[in-house]
Image (spheres, grey):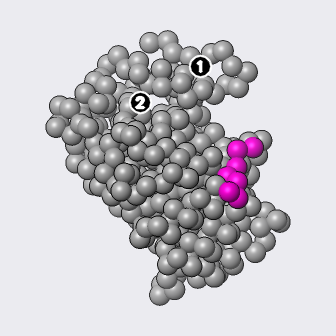
Amino acid sequence: MALTLLGRSNPLASPYEQLRILDQLTSSLPFNRRLEQNQLFPLHATGITVFQINVGKVCNQTCRHCHVDAGPDRRESMSAETADHCLTALAMTDIPTVDITGGAPELNPNFRRLVERSRALGRHVMDRCNLTVLLLPSQHDLAGFLASNRVEIVASLPYFHAPQTNAQRGDGVFEKSIEAIRLLNRLGYGQPNTGLVLNLVHNPVGAFLPPTQSAIEERFRKELGRHYGIAFNHLYTIANMPISRFLEFLLESGNYESYMQRLANAFNPLAVTGVMCRHTLSVGWDGMLYDCDFNQMLELPVGDGAPEHIRDFDPARLHDRRIVTRNHCYGCTAGSGSSCGGSVV
C-alpha cells in the first residue's frame, strides 16, 4: 500500500491524518475487532493509580521516534492555571503516583511546583527525563532538586552503545546521557539502600519489537557497568508507537505495513489486561483528559460521557470509564505488552 503524509509544510501529519492512515490496515483485523474476538471489548478502566501530567512539547532534543513531536521549537506548555487545576484534582483523591512527562518536563516553569506540591500531598512522583536536560546551564541544580524531593527518574536510553542511541536521539546524546547518569549516581540514584530510583527505558532503534525485558536489562547492566561504571535500578522496554515521528519514519522507509502486521501478529490478550490506560489518567498540557499519552497525541480525549477537562475533574465518573481504543493500540498489546512501566506480562 502506498501511504504518505501529504499536504502540510510540516512533514508530520495532523492527528486526524495519522488516524486515517492507521485505520487503513489491509492485512490484519482492526484492533477493536480483535478485542471483540477475545471478549475484551469494550475495554474499561479499573481505577486511577497513576495521574500522568504532560506539561508540554518543549524539549532540548528532537528525537526521531518521539510520539510527542517535541523539540526546542515547540511552544505548547502547561500554564500555571492548568497546573493548579491538576493539583486541586489530585488533592481530591488518594491516587498514589504522579507521573510528570513532556517534552522535557523539567523545562516547564511549573515543573518544580508540581513536584513539591505533589510530594507535600504524600504522593510518589516520577519524572520522565531525557537525561541531557540535567546538563543544561539553566538546570544546574535540577539533579539535586530531584534527589532532595526523592523523585523517581525514568530516563530514556535507547541502547548501551553510542551509534544506535545517537542515530535515534541526536549527535552526542549518548555521551551526554552517560555523563548525566554519572551525576545521578553520585547523588545516590541507582545505588543500593538510598531509595533514589533510576530506571532506564529501552525502545528499539528501528521497526522492531523490543526484546524480552529481563534479558535486555541484564545486558544493559553488564555493558553500562563494565564500560562506563554506571548503575541503575531497572530497565523498561517500550515498543515504538506507530504515531507522529515514528509513523513518518515507517512510511518513508516503507516499513509501515510490515510493522503494523508484526504488531498485530504479536497481539497478546493477556497484555490487554495490564495496559496503562486501565489505571492511568493522562492530562494534556492544555488540561484535556485522555486515557493515555498516546491517545493524547492523537487528540482522542476520554469518552463515555466522562469529563474531558481537568477543571471538571470527577474521579467517580472517570474511575471505570470506557477506554478509547484504535489501531495504534496494537503497539501496547504486542508480545509481553508495553506501557510507561515497561512490559506488562
Q: Residue at x 53, y 47 (%)?
A: 309
Foreground of the two, 298 or 311: 311
Residue 153 in view (yes/no) = yes
Q: Among all residues in the image, which is located at the extreme right?
A: 137
Mark on residue 5? 1
Q: Residue at x 78, y 71 (%)?
A: 140
Against 301, residue 143 (above or below) is below
Against 136, residue 334 (above or below) is above
Question: Counting residues from the N terminus, which is met first, the one under dot 1 or under dot 2?
Answer: 1
Residue 240 in view (yes/no) = no
Against 144, residue 299 (above or below) is above
For marks 1 and 2, give the CA distance.
17 Å
Foreground of the two, 182 or 328: 328
Q: How many marks?
A: 2
Q: State the residue position of label 2.
A: 259
Foreground of the two, 187 or 126: 126
Please name the amino acid that badge 2 sits on.
Tyr
Principal SS element in the magenta part? loop
Q: Is residue 166 left or right of residue 41?
A: right
**Which one is closest to the eye, mark 1 or mark 2?**
1
Count residues near mark 1 (Cα–Cα under 10 Å), then give few for <14, some for 14-19, many for 20+.
some
Quadrant the N terminus occupies: top left
Q: Among all residues in the image, which is located at the extreme top?
A: 2
Name the image quarter holding residue 261.
Answer: top left
